[in-house]
Amino acid sequence: MGDLLERTPTVSNNRGENVEQYDVMVIGAGVTGLYAVYRLRELGLSVQAFEGGGGVGGTWYWNRYPGCRFDSESYTYGYSFSEELLQEWDWKEYYSGQPENERYLNYVADKFHLRPHIRCNSQVTSVVFDDANGLWQVNIEDGHRARGQFLITAVGSLSAYYIPDFEGLNSFQGDWCHTGRWPAEGLDLAGKRVGVIGTGATGIQLITEIAKEVGHLTVFQRTANYAAPLRNGLIDPDTQRRIKASYPEIFKMCSETAGSFIHQFDPRSAFDVTPEERLEQYERLWAEPGFKKWLSNFYDVMMPGAANEDYAEFVRNKIRERVKDPVVAEKLVPKDHMFGSKRLPCESGYYEVFNQDNVLLVDVREAPIVRITPKGVQTTEAEYELDVLIFATGYDAVTGPLNRIDIRGEGGQTLKDKFANGPRTFMGISSAGFPNLFTINAASVGNFVRACEPLVDWVCEAICYVREHGYTRISATPEAENEWTKHVSEAGAKILRTQANSWFVGANIPGKARVLLTSPDTAPVMRAKRAEVAAKGYAGFLLQ
Ligand code: NA7
C-alpha cells in the first residue's frame, strides 16, 4: 500500500514534461479529503491528495484559535467507516476542542497509512482539463504538477478566509491575524490590548476564551447573534463504554435528521401546547447541552413565523438576564434576523465576558469602522488603540475556495466565470463542461463527517460506474444543472437559512451574488436523490 506512490506512472504532458499520473486527484486533506483518499485507495485506484496546509485536518489544522471546538457532539462527528477506529478512539469531551480534533485526524491518517497519498504544503493554484487526453492537470504553487482522470475538490465550505478590505491594515503596528490562520506557535495575548472584529460562531468562541487573559478587550460587533450555552463536559468512562456500544444507533439517528445531527425535532407545533408547557419545554431544552435547544425544539421554531419569533424572544431574554449593564445587553440582543437563520453559535460564558471591567463592546453598525490606523481601529466616533487585532470575520463560503483556484474546464471556460452569479451545478457535485470534476465541497453541509461520508461513497461509486461501463467522462447535463439551480433558488427561498445575511447566501462578502450556496434539501432527501440518480444509470449526467 505504502509504495503506491513509487509505482505511480508518469506521463508526458503537452509541454513534454514528465508528470505523475493518477486515477483520481483530491484537493484538500481535511475530513472529506482524508476519507476520499481512504475509500479510493481501498477501491484499488491510484489517488493523490494535494493539501495547502503543512499537515492534515483542514478546518482542524488551520483553526488553532483559543476556544475553537465542535458544536456537534464529538461521538457523532468521528468517521463511521471503521469499527476498529470507533472502538480505539476515546473522545475526551462531549464537544471536543481543536487540538484533540487535529490529533484525531492525524491518528486516522497514520492508522490507515494515508500519508503516502497526501502531498502537504501544496497549494493548488490552477487545474486545467486537457480535452484531448481527458485528463485534469493540477498545478501547485511550488511548480509541482500532476495529472489524473478524476478530480475531487474536498476544499471545505469554510476555508477561504475573509478579511474585509479595510483601508490602512498594513499600517497597523501591532500583530494581527485571521482566526482561520492562527499562528501554530500561538499569539501572546497576556496583558495586551486586544481587538476582535466579528461576533459569529468563531468570534464568540474566541472572545470567551481570550477574555480570561488579555489586559483589555475591545469587541467590534456589527450584528448581534443568538448564542446558546454549549454545556460541555468530560465524558466519563461509563459513558465512554455506552457510546462505544451504541455507535450503530448513534449513526442511524444522525442519518435520519435534516442536518445529520443527533437531534430530532419535536413533531408538535409550539402552539399545540399551552403557553406553560411551551415555556417548560424551552427551559428544559435550554438546560441541555449543544444544539438540542435549536434542533430538538417544536418543529415550527425552525420555520419563519410566530413560533420562531416566540422562541427568539425567549432567547433574547436569556441574554438580557446575563448581562448586567442593560445598555450593553440590548446591544447584544439580536433583533434583525430570525432565530436559527444562521447556524447557532454555542458558548461557554460569552455573555458574562461583557460584565468584565476590561471589556468594551463597540457597535460598528452605529459607528462603522473607517480605517485601521497604525495604533488600532478608527470608527466614525473614536480610535481604539490596540496591541493585537484579530479578524473573526468569517469566510467566502463554498464557492470561495473554488474561485481561489483557477479551474478551467472544456474549451478553457473557468468555473469562476460560470459561478459568477452563484453555483451552477447538479446536486452541488458536478457542473456541465467540467467533466470528471466532483465539487464535493459544494454539496456537503450540516454535521460534516456524517454528510461527507455518504457523499464520498456516492462519488466513488460514480467513478467505478464510469470505468466499469466503458465510459471515460461524466458531467452534469446542462438540463439537469438548470433544473437544480432553479430548485435551489425556489425551494431555498422558503427556508430559514436564506432569511438572514449570512455566508449561507454569500451576503457576508461584498459584491457576491446572493444565492443559497448549499442544498435546500435535508440530508436524507439528498441521499435519496443521489441514490435515485445512480439507480437510473446516472440520470442527469452526460456519460461519454
Ligand atoms: P461568520 O458567521 O460569517 O461571522 C463573521 C463575523 O464577522 C460576523 O459577526 C460579521 O458581522 C463580522 N464581519 C464581517 N465583515 C465585517 C466588517 N466589514 N465589519 C465588521 N464586522 C464584520 O463567520 P464565523 O467564522 O464566525 O463562523 C462561520 C461558521 O463556522 C459558522 O457558521 C459555524 O458553522 C462555524 P455580520 O454578521 O456580517 O454583520
Image (cartoon, rainbow, N blue to C red):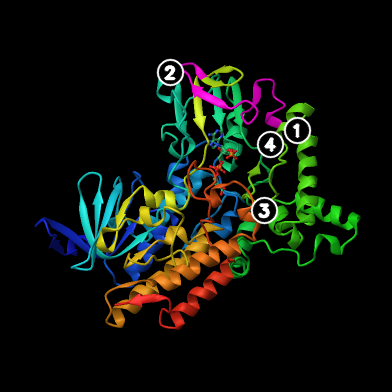
- The disc at residue 349 is 4
Q: Indicate which label's residue lies in the foreground, 2 or 3.
A: 2
Q: Which residue has dot 3 on it?
A: 291
Circle nearer the N terminus (1, 3): 3
Q: Give the range drawn in magenta.
A: 348-376
Residue 539 screen position, x and y as percent: 43, 79
Residue 173's label in the rendered image is 2
Query: Mark 3: which amino acid?
Result: Phe
Residue visible at 54% across and 46% down in the picture: 507
Which residue in the protein does label 1 denote?
330
Pointer 1: residues within 10 angstroms few (<14), some, or many (20+)? some
Quadrant for the C terminus in the image: bottom left
Within 10 Å of disc 4 (Cα), the crowding (few <14, some 14-19, many 20+) is some
Q: Do the residues labelled 4 and 2 touch (CB within 8 Å)?
A: no
Question: From what the image shows, is residue 8 above or below residue 354?
Answer: below
Front tag of 1 and 3: 1
Which of discs 4 and 2 lies nearer the camera? The answer is 2
For ligand 1, the image quadrant comes to top right
